[in-house]
Image: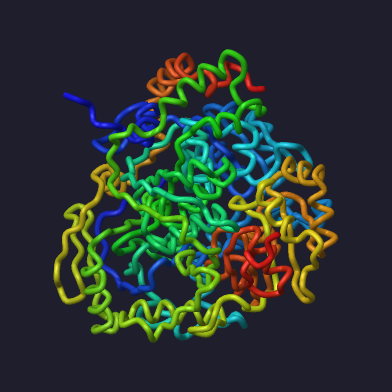
């Protein structure tokens, strides 16, 4: 069950290259196995964060102060594209990231964020670029504020921007709702649908038995 | 008032609505849920830990593909892969889910076995914890990848809450030139619209060149939908699709078959259907495509040159191109053809079906893999493997110096330890040339099976059209 998300004021790190894929966020070999949760934070952005010899890449933003403390990422277009691996969200979360701000996100990554209480904020690219520029100007010292209830973000220089969000998603994050439990409350409807559908499309339901 | 035409997406979507959740969001019924070894047992264990059971085990199917070795005899499967396989066996058995196990017809890459077994049907809503689930749209299914949380949701409820996507129609018009394949068509599209061009959309592929494609080519097209950002891709089902499905193991039979086909004929988008975005691609001008960078949108024709970052005024784009060139170890402005390769991988849910192996074998027949190149053929399923062996394709490949492997995902995503070594260059028929996708610091060039076979023979990225007979 996701933790509720209300407001957040935190250091933000810009990672502005477009099309950062979920393979880059977390390599697949870190996700093979059932006992991986809790071990992923140090492997987030592993390909960018570490040099071939395993030492930290001093150039990579999350290895630099004050961005080491970042809880928000400001991202380029199509962040989180590619693989559906929810481990990408787990890795960000275990690294301490609680919100990502960008002009667009990979569709599956976007959905996975909400499932884990991470807020993906979609705003115009001009606003994203402006945030990144302000972060750079203040050398990361300026924080970004996010208020989910009010649907606003506040830039390091104090500019406020409104963002749109699906009301259902917003409510889910504010309250930390468990989607599985909510849907199971509608099980009568699911079963009624299936009973009717068995007549409509019997081939889908193998007419009661599986070959 | 006349009803506006409806899209195929709308028809299939509406048929699956259990309940409206909000204006644009619905609780949808899931007709087929496919599990694999990487996430299947994790989901079943998650369900168990919540004290829940699988809602409809008879609509759920499992197979190991991601983490098992594809070496002969499955030799060298990594320890964690063995654990995942064991857990998948235990948990599917406990839940009454059909598992297609290794060495059994039915085992294979989830997106190869779904269509092959007749599980993937027109109008069917299919999900799987894998982004390439869009593949099944090639038969007119509404199919998309989901994350781990959604996977647990589907196991528990056989339903999923989804926001209705926007619609895009891509019409591939004209006659495909000789030597050009479905893979070249879809890579050319990604080059045209970009890796985010389809984000937020369900894409319907249409036009004469799609109608002309065999079903396996349509599966390849739909497979790469996610690489243009769209989690759903689909092709209207037609007689070709019905003939492909007829007689398959889980396909409707007898009287049920006629009923199903009648229903499937009503699925294609109405003539007046309106899409949120339309794209038209003239296929006559498509060359064999090959990627040069670290996103599938970094793609050029085989006669093309590697882009020069200095040629663009946009500083962001310049930086992105330079990052890609540095990672790939390529020189701006150089021709892509002739770039030496170390590895060739023919396989993956994109291009591991019988027609793909035939196309590669046609190039390989009577020739030799260039010295210093390792070339793997990884069939997409146990059935593809057996059919290929029955035709003698394995002999053609091994005589040419290719390695003939067992079915699985293998080196497409390197989850099973099968990797391209750091710094080495691979031509791959898979779907992603991301940083480190085929192994840390591996350099991947995506291409069609025939083009990949040509690269293996030439020892370098090569124009397959010069090798065709």
Image quadrant holding the N terminus of chain A, namely top left
- Residue B422: which quarter of the image? bottom right
Image quadrant holding the C terminus of chain A, namely top right
- Of A9 and B408, nearer the camera is B408
- In this image, B449 relative to B27: left or right? right
Give the number of marks.
0
- Residue B95: which quarter of the image? top right
- Of B406 and A134, nearer the camera is B406
- In this image, B177 relative to B191: left or right? right
Q: Which residue lies at the image location 23% right of the left edge and 27% below the top edge?
A: B3
Percent coordinates x, y for residue B427 in the rendering:
63, 67
Q: Which residue lies at the image location 57% right of the left edge and 42% below the top edge?
A: B214
Percent coordinates x, y for residue B11 in the rendering:
36, 30
Evaluate whether residue A204 shows in this view.
yes
Q: Which residue lies at the image location 45% right of the left edge and 36% below the top edge?
A: B236
- In this image, B13 relative to B431: left or right? left
Q: Which residue lies at the image location 62% right of the left edge and 56% below the top edge?
A: A32
Percent coordinates x, y for residue B217 in the rendering:
57, 47
- Of A111 and B399, nearer the camera is B399
């Amino acid at each position: 069950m996701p933790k509720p998300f209300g407001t957040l004021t935190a250091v933000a790190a810009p990672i502005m290259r477009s099309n950062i894929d979920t393979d880059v966020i977390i390599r697949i070999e870190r996700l093979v196995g059932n006992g991986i949760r809790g071990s992923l934070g140090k492997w987030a952005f592993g390909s960018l964060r570490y040099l071939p010899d395993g030492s930290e890449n001093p150039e990579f933003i999350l290895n630099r102060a004050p961005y080491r403390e970042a809880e928000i990422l400001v991202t380029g277009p199509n962040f989180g594209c590619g693989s559906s691996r929810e481990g990408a969200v787990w890795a960000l979360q275990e690294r301490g990231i609680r919100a990502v701000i960008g002009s667009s996100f990979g569709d599956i990554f976007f959905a996975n964020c909400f499932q884990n209480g991470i807020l993906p904020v979609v705003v115009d690219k001009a606003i994203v670029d402006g945030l990144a520029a302000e972060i750079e100007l203040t050398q990361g010292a300026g924080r970004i504020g996010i208020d989910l209830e009010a649907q606003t973000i506040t830039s390091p220089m104090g500019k406020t921007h409104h963002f749109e969000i699906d009301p259902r998603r917003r409510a889910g994050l504010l309250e930390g709702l468990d989607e599985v439990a909510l849907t199971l409350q509608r099980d009568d409807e699911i079963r009624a649908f299936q009973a009717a559908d068995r007549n409509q499309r019997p081939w889908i339901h193998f007419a009661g038995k599986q070959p | 008032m006349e009803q506006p035409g409806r899209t195929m997406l709308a028809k299939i979507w509406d048929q699956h609505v259990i309940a409206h959740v909000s204006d644009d969001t619905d609780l949808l019924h899931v007709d087929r849920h496919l599990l694999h070894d990487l996430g299947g047992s994790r989901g079943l264990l998650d369900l168990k830990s919540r004290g829940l059971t699988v809602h409809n085990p008879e609509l759920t199917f499992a197979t190991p593909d991601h983490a098992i070795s594809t070496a002969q005899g499955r030799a060298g499967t990594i320890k964690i892969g063995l654990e995942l396989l064991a857990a998948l066996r235990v948990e599917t058995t406990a839940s009454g889910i059909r598992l297609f196990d290794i060495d059994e017809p039915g085992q294979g890459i989830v997106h190869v076995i779904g269509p092959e077994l007749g599980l993937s049907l027109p109008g069917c809503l299919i999900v799987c914890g894998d982004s390439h689930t869009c593949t099944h749209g090639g038969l007119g299914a509404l199919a998309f990848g989901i994350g781990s949380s959604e996977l647990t949701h589907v196991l528990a409820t056989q339903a999923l809450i989804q926001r209705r996507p926007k619609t895009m129609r891509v019409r591939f018009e004209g006659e495909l030139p000789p030597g050009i394949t479905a893979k070249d068509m879809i890579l050319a599209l990604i080059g045209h619209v970009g890796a985010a061009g389809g984000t937020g959309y369900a894409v319907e592929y249409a036009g004469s060149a799609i109608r002309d494609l065999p079903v396996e080519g349509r599966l390849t097209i739909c497979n790469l939908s996610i690489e243009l950002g769209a989690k759903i891709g689909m092709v209207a089902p037609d007689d070709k699709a019905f003939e492909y499905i007829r007689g398959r193991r889980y396909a409707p039979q007898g009287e049920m078959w006629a009923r199903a086909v009648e229903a499937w004929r009503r699925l294609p988008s109405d003539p007046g259907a309106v899409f949120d975005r339309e794209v038209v691609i003239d296929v006559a001008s498509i060359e064999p495509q090959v990627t040069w960078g670290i996103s599938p949108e970094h793609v050029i024709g085989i006669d093309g040159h590697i882009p020069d970052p200095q040629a663009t005024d946009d500083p962001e784009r310049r930086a992105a191109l330079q990052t890609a060139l540095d990672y790939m170890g390529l020189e701006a402005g150089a021709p892509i053809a002739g770039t030496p390769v170390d590895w060739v991988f023919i396989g993956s849910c994109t291009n591991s079906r019988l027609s793909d192996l035939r196309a590669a074998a046609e190039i390989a027949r009577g020739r030799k893999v260039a010295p210093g190149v390792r070339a793997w053929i990884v069939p997409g399923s146990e059935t593809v493997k057996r059919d290929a062996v029955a035709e003698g394709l394995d002999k053609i490949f091994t005589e040419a110096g290719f390695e003939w492997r067992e079915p699985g995902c293998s080196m497409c995503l390197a989850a099973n330890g099968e990797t391209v070594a750091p710094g080495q260059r691979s031509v791959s028929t898979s779907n992603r040339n991301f940083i480190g996708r085929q192994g840390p610091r591996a350099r991947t060039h995506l291409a069609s099976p025939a083009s990949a076979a040509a690269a293996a023979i030439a020892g370098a990225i090569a124009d397959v059209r010069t090798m065709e007979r």
